[in-house]
Image: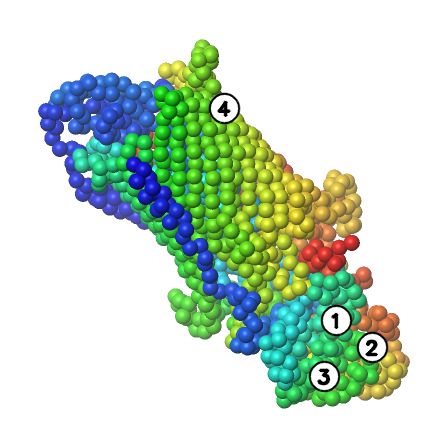
Amino acid sequence: MIRLRASVASTALLAVAWLLPPATVRAQDTQSGTIRGKVTAPGGIPVGNAQVSIVGTTIGSMTARDGEYVIRNAPVGARTVRVRMIGYAPATSPVTVPAGGSATLNFELTVQAMALDEVVVTGTAGAARKREVGNSIGTINLATAPKVQTDFGSMIAGSLSGVQVTGGSGNAGAGKAIRLRGNTSVALSNQPLLYIDGVRVRSDEYPKNLPEAGSNLRSGNINASPLNDIAPDDIERIEVVKGAAAATLYGTDAAAGVIQIFTKRGSQGAPKWQANVTTGISKEQKFGTNDAKLLFMDPFLRTGKSMEAQAQVSGGTANNVRYFLSGSSSSAEGVLPLDLDRKYNVRANLDFSPLKNVTVSWNSSYSNSNIANTPAGNNAHGITLNAFRRDRNYFASANPDTIRQVLRYKLNTYIDRSVLGLTGTWAPHPLFNSRMTLGMDRAAVENRNLRPYGFYGAAQGIINDQRWENRTLSVDWVNSLDQNYLNNDFHVTMSFGTQYVNSDVADNSSYSENFPGPGQPTVSSGSLKNAFENRQMVITGGGFAQAMMGYKDRYFMTFGLRVDGNSAFGKNFGLQKYPKVSGSWVASDESWWPARFGTTLKLRAALGQAGRAPGAFDAVQTWVPVGWGTQPAFRPSNLGNADLGPERTTETEAGFDLTAFDNRLTMDFTAYRARTTDALFPVTSVPSLGFLNSQLKNVGTMEKHGLEMTIGGTVLDREHLGINATLSLTTNSSKVVSLGGAPAFTIGSGNAFAWVMEGQPVPVIRGRLVRNKDALVNAGSAPDTVGNHIFGPAAPTRIIGGTVTVRTWRGITASVRGEYQGGAYISENSSFQALSRTVLWPTCFGAYDRIAAGQQITNWQNATCVQKNTREDMFIFKADFFKLRDFTVTVPLGKAIPGTSSSSLVFTAQNFLRRNYGLPMFDPEQSGNDGYNVAARYISEHIPAPAVFMTSLRVSF
Amino acid sequence: MTKQISLVLAGALLTAACELKVTNPGPVNADFLDNKSALPAIVNGAGRDLADALNWTLYTSAAAAREIWPAGSTGSFGISVNTQNGRLTEDESGDYWDRTQRARWTAEHGAARLKEVLGSADYAKSTQAAQILVWSGFANRMLGENMCTGVIDGGAAEDSKVYFTRAEANFTEAMTVASAAGNATLVTAAQAGRASVRLNLNNLTGAVADAGAIANTFAYKMPYYTNEQAQYNRIYFANANQPYRAYTQKWTWVEGYRAATKDPRVAYDSSATLTQGDGAVGGQPDGSSGKVRWYFQTKYATQNANVNLVSGWEMRLIEAESKLIGNDVAGAVAIINTRRAALNVPLVTAATSADAWTALKRERAIELWLEARRLGDLRRWKAASRPGSYDTREDLANRDLCFPISLQEKQSNTNLKP
């Protein structure tokens, strides 16, 4: 079935693409010729997806996976051909095109981690060369990413310093959180803003599949992610601006940084086809103790099988229409018995010039996901909770066949996602251009949650169906005017523009229970029905102006101002202004710079502000209609705050980008310090004044600072052996400077024990310290503990990542990527849930033996293994760990497969080795019941993400 | 060129001037409630808040008072390890303190809003006003009986008797307004409620006078509904095997008493197929640690089982307690036995005042079983050093008899800060 689905989708894509006008393959005339060749990296490794073009024309092509390209209809005579590929230095070479004939032109690119003339657009008000930009912009070089991408989160994990990807679980479809320079806000989402080809799209998680009435834990207790809707193979490059200094022009909402994804586009030339077929398995690794490696989940876990097929075609027609089309289909079983994630994606990107001086880019993508989950997490109707708790579970039985009754629970999530973007660029004058992007992102989720008739613990059955939709409309208009003075030594680019973002969420749930009998019920089947609706619209609108000045193409200064309004601001709050200033100096362009080491150096510094807006209802005092029986009823809800505004983050960063030894060594370094003022804190309400919900107030001040450094180098570069290595280091320390008179408060779930307290990290884990852990005491005696102990930050303070790639005979490469994270603490709630119910728990097996033998046990065992002594806030551990993120072997097959121009075979193993330094069980990165994007995670009754092993065959033709 | 740029600039400014005002549906602006048409929903909201507070306080106070024994669950519908050990701590008091304070606030301030919107004259004869005053009275009584400390509207800490004083005023006003509105049920409910708070204020004369006006069969109940789980009777649902079997009557005084007397007021049952609770606990009276035999109460047998706020039979026990305080042992026992005889359960005997107090304490435990009243009784008798004893299974050493001020109140209420 899996194979069939993948095959059908691929065939459909091929059929559609085949209908394209074959304008580029018409017979050559005598006024044109053909240029063909191959683009390789050092060691002869083919470089696919490189842009090859004839300078001064719009004619060009892209290289196939084997690095080969063909440019047909090239004008005859002497021409210059340019090759561009991110991560490599641009290359140009002359060629003479014979009339009606063919010229061969090969390129060997050199790796260039820091390309000063590479154009970036994120946070820069239009396009800018990297040399002009005073802040760090991370560009993810797909050449160094793992060759088989499972999802967007895995793709960027460990790829850039300052980027942390956490979360994930053993459940199919679970998303991951992205943090840029740690947490910026305690009350609002810390997920960065996300743009795809200039269109603002949703980055926060999708709603969890749960019943609207009753326990909100009746679920798989995971959140799907909009980031998983993006087909990794469609992505050409990713730009990341990590903080307020770089994201100022995005204004309100940008304080947590911005990620912009650029998908592939077509270029002039014949269609280039690429196709992949990937198969794999996922398997849960040990997360318990040696006595119970899978924490009693063994009877329920399986080896998940996966299959993916993907095909894409790109090219350009003679009338200057360029296209990129892709489609993919995948099906991945999870390790839990009901888990299945089926997905298909299609994308069509077109570029054309309908008028003189006008270019239009059309981007469209659609993805459809069908995720089935097993009930899990801290769910009394779930499999993990009942397996972990053994015979003290809700069945009072550890019999696997008894526990399997929960598998009648059906959890299905259907996601429809469409992103449309239309960008028009008008350049009426060489020094002026105006660009407008209209965007629409529609994410529609159906969560269907069914406990059928006869289900254990809900004998009459319960169903909930949620239809949730988030539509984001965006307009982005940017205008740039260039002026040159002093014989072109002094250059000024004035930019101004306006943005509008309208995010509208419509959320309807219908719920019913008490079905009349067996069968396939709908919500109409239940005798007791409830309906729920939430609607929230938030509008942000603003404009900006920026001036970038450059002198002698090596001294640059940029000044900018963003002004924003937001519908969620309090009525006493007006427009907000966010200024920025930055500068860069390409020191290596100075005449006095020594050239002997082949060194380039750019120094940079930036200062800027960005904000984060409150939620739709936070500013207004509201009462919520709750009903009472069949009667109407009001209950106090939100206290309201007419002075509510955005929190404001001011960030300073400085650093340098360095290459040496002719690009054999690269290094970038950034130090940053950010201060958030008017920080939105959920100030605890006074219960005796009726309103129990916390009220957001702009009262806090927070700081964070850190270092980011990446060093990459070519260790060895021989014909049949090359070794490249990259090491990245990230530090991040945060502190609550002031609570503004508000009391300390917790964030996230109470089970996380994450506090926001003056003078402590944001947030800090506070709980009960068991002292003298190893001292021997009598079982059942009062344990030696102290409450309200400050353990440490919830977020890691140091991350060290490394990649080593070895190129061997015939271009076979092996790469390994690892990451260490340290400094964080985490609450492990699963053990408490079990031990507080006297479940015979693996971490206590030794203690049970000693108690049975009448021997003393340690104070730690006494505190945690003797039920009357257990407290929920005791189970706090260091969350340090090391993981091998992936190990990949790529075997080029050349033309070994008949009919193809090239092919390769890729083997990848991901997430297969982890070592904890503190946490005795589980994975410190796994999500809890509250999803991946919560301010502070904790370990709940989930299983960690499994190891994944995949093989991919990739062909070009 | 200049013209083109000017056009673009004008367009940009126009776009930037987009309307940003959004009114989202759903939650209601507080200003909208000052409207006659909104008053029924305000009164019902106060009722729902009280039902909610009673739901939570009833369950955990029952665990602390050993009206029920934990059967394993510690989260969701469970009993925390602290409460299993008889400790009621500030960090676990939020669900009880906060909800009950909200119930008081919404009722008291709802009454004030009614007076403002209706005007004094209409308010004085409004059934809605009488109803919300009754809710106010019972919310204050629940605070007085279950909370250690008095705090009103973000004020300073004071004696918890302040709640009873306010409840007495609420009930008194409710009687007047309900009488003017012609609502006899509310008049009786308010008077019965006032009798119960007067007992706590040691105004025995007033309590007995009010109690005497209430018929045996009268009962004023807090309704629960099947609409959604949040409106279910929580103590039923926590033990309804849906899927929670969070507590049991095993190891409680009820186990032996019910078996011996078949008293229908403390009914419980067992299952042949589901014999144990949904977890396990340590420190059981026989020294064991592990799964517990599951005996489930049947006083509340449905999701929408109502809970007595006050009843005529409680009034009789107020009269009996008054007699005992006056040392009229025979009179007290006679009242107790009136009810027992009607139920055909063994009558009590008392040779001494202490015996009679023991009987009265037991009888209130039976009559008001699982109604969020036991901690208040235990605290009142302890404060007054009343004689008599308790069943050994109820008499937990070092037990807390009231909920402390919640952590949220302590942290947010500036008048409580040292």
Question: Are the two marked residues, 3 and 4, in contact with CB atoms closer than 8 angstroms?
Answer: no
Kindly tell me whether residue A881 is visible in this rendering.
no
Task: Find residue A828 and name its label.
Answer: none
The chain containing the residue under callout 3 comes to B
* Residue B71 position within the rendered picture, expressed as x and y whole percent measured from the top left: 66, 63
Please give the chain letter of the residue carrying mark 2: B
Q: Which residue is mark 3?
A: B191
Q: Which residue is mark 4?
A: A603
Left or right: B289 in relation to B319: left
Labels 2 and 1 within one chain: yes
Q: Residue at the left extreme? A: A30
Q: Are marks 2 and 3 in contact (CB under 8 Å)?
A: no
**Total label count?**
4
Residues behind callouts 3 and 4 on a single chain: no
Q: Is residue A843 left or right of residue B364?
A: left
The residue nearer to you, when weighing A836 against A100, is A100
Dot 2 or dot 3: first in sequence order is 3
Q: Amino acid at mark 2?
A: Asn
Using the rendered view, name the quadrant where residue A73 is placed: top left
User: Which colour scheme appears in the figure?
Assistant: rainbow
Q: Residues within 10 Å of mark 1 (few under 14, many from 20)?
A: many
Spatial separation of the CA atoms under disc 3 and disc 4: 82 Å
Q: Which mark is residue B163?
A: 1
Give the CA separation, mark 1 to mark 3.
17 Å
Q: Residues within 10 Å of mark 3 (few under 14, many from 20)?
A: many
Residue type, numbered disc 3: Gln
Residue at 64% in and 65% down? A690
Query: Reading the chain from its start, which is encountered first: label 1 or label 3?
Result: 1
Residue B186 percent coordinates (x, y): 65, 84
Position of A950 compared to A880: left or right?
A: left
